[in-house]
Image (tube, rainbow, N blue to C red):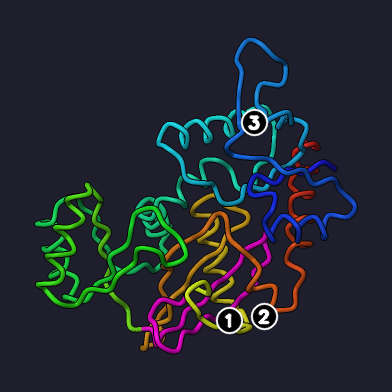
């Protein structure tokens, strides 16, 4: 079976999938080379010289930065591939939802999942009001962002006003979320189809628990409660491959913080000893075979 990898061909992730996909052909595709035609060629969507339609399934990895026009066009091309019967993991609409922290959190809340109290607004005045409503201890996040970049914890009113005024200058949306005391640890749950793997992340001196910021990963036994939480979160955003970040507070409650529709698996593969890349390849093949049968 021919499988596409939409991401960086020189990445560890492509090499790992290539290793695992020994019985299949894995071809690298580039977001920056996506093109499409209407009323001209039979193969309407392509990445450079490779027709997307030649791939039975495509794994969507991290999209590179681009202008608003470029990002919208890339999503349009992926949608065109899907409408022609192609299988995307994850679908274009899912990627759009998950990359937008507000929209993803709203979908999680609508599905009845526990999420932190959050206010999203557009002016410093509104943000200051949210700061006070949320108890004067908040995390301010960029609406679009990953790996802990751009996050800051604010628990001083004067500092809060300066932060929000600065964000106003660059016309940023204010994403203000109540800070949850979590002992500098959280859980990353990786959903692959109906399977859930877990990893605890802990940082000795930073409340941000991203591995890229120096946190340590440890194997986590996924309870039935956490498994159901992860699967419900995946369904809420329409994903079959997703990373779900869960924050445990000091009282034993859980909060779903974010979902990542283009999750990395290097850390969780190392701490669990599970061949995650092989599971992902098997999932892609299963999805493609299901589409062929329909």
- Give the crowd class for mark 2: few <14, some 14-19, many >=20 residues within 10 Å: some
211 sits left or right of 8 in the view? left
Which of the pair 183/227 is nearer the observer? 183
- Give the crowd class for mark 3: few <14, some 14-19, many >=20 residues within 10 Å: many
Q: Earlier in the sequence, mark 2 or mark 1?
A: 1
Q: Which residues are magenta?
A: 182-209
Q: In the rendered image of this protein, does residue 34 appear above or below residue 29?
A: above
What x and y, as percent, mark residue 149?
40, 64
The residue at the far front in this view is 10
Which of the pair 175/34 is nearer the observer? 34
Q: CA distance from mark 1 to mark 3?
A: 37 Å
Which numbered disc, 2 or 3, marks the residue closer to the eye?
Answer: 2
Q: Which residue is mark 1?
A: 217
Q: Which residue is mark 2?
A: 271
Q: Residue at x 59, y 78 (%)?
A: 199
Q: Quadrant of residue 113?
A: bottom left
Q: CA distance from mark 2 to mark 1?
A: 7 Å
What x and y, as percent, mark residue 232?
53, 61
104 sits left or right of 33 in the view? left
Q: Do labels 2 and 1 touch, CB within 8 Å? A: yes
Q: Residue at x 22, y 49 (%)?
A: 170
152 sits left or right of 111 in the view? left
In which quadrant is the N terminus drawn? top right
Q: In the rendered image of this protein, does residue 131 appear above or below residue 21?
A: below
Which numbered disc, 1 or 3, marks the residue closer to the eye?
Answer: 1
SS state under label 3: helix
On whether residue 193 falls in the magenta region, the answer is yes
What x and y, as percent, mark residue 128?
12, 63
Q: Do labels 1 and 3 touch, CB within 8 Å? A: no
72 sits left or right of 22 in the view? left
Q: Which residue is mark 3?
A: 81
């Amino acid at each position: 079976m021919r499988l596409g990898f939409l991401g960086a061909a020189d990445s560890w992730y492509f090499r790992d999938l290539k290793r695992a996909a020994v019985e299949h052909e894995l071809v690298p595709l580039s977001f920056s080379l996506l093109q499409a035609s209407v009323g001209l060629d039979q193969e309407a969507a392509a990445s450079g010289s490779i027709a997307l339609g030649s791939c039975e399934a495509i794994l969507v990895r991290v999209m590179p930065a681009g202008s608003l026009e470029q990002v919208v066009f890339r999503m349009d091309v992926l949608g065109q591939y899907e409408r022609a019967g192609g299988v995307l993991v994850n679908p274009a609409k899912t990627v759009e939802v998950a990359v937008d922290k507000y929209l993803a959190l709203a979908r999680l809340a609508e599905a009845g999942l526990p999420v932190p109290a959050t206010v999203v607004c557009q002016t410093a005045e509104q943000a200051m009001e949210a700061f006070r409503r949320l108890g004067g201890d908040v995390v301010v996040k960029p609406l679009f962002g990953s790996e802990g970049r751009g996050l800051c914890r604010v628990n001083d009113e004067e500092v809060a006003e300066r932060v929000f005024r600065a964000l106003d200058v660059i016309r940023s949306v204010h994403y203000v979320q109540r800070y949850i005391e979590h002992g500098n640890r959280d859980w990353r749950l990786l959903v692959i189809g109906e399977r859930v793997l877990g990893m605890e992340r802990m940082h000795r001196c930073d409340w941000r628990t991203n591995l890229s910021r120096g946190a340590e990963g440890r194997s986590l036994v996924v309870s039935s409660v956490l498994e159901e939480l992860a699967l419900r979160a995946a369904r809420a955003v329409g994903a079959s491959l997703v990373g779900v970040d869960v924050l445990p507070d000091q009282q034993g409650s859980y909060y779903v913080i974010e979902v990542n529709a283009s999750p990395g698996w290097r850390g969780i593969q190392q701490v669990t000893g599970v061949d995650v890349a092989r599971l992902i390849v098997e999932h892609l093949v299963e999805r493609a075979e299901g589409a062929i049968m329909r």
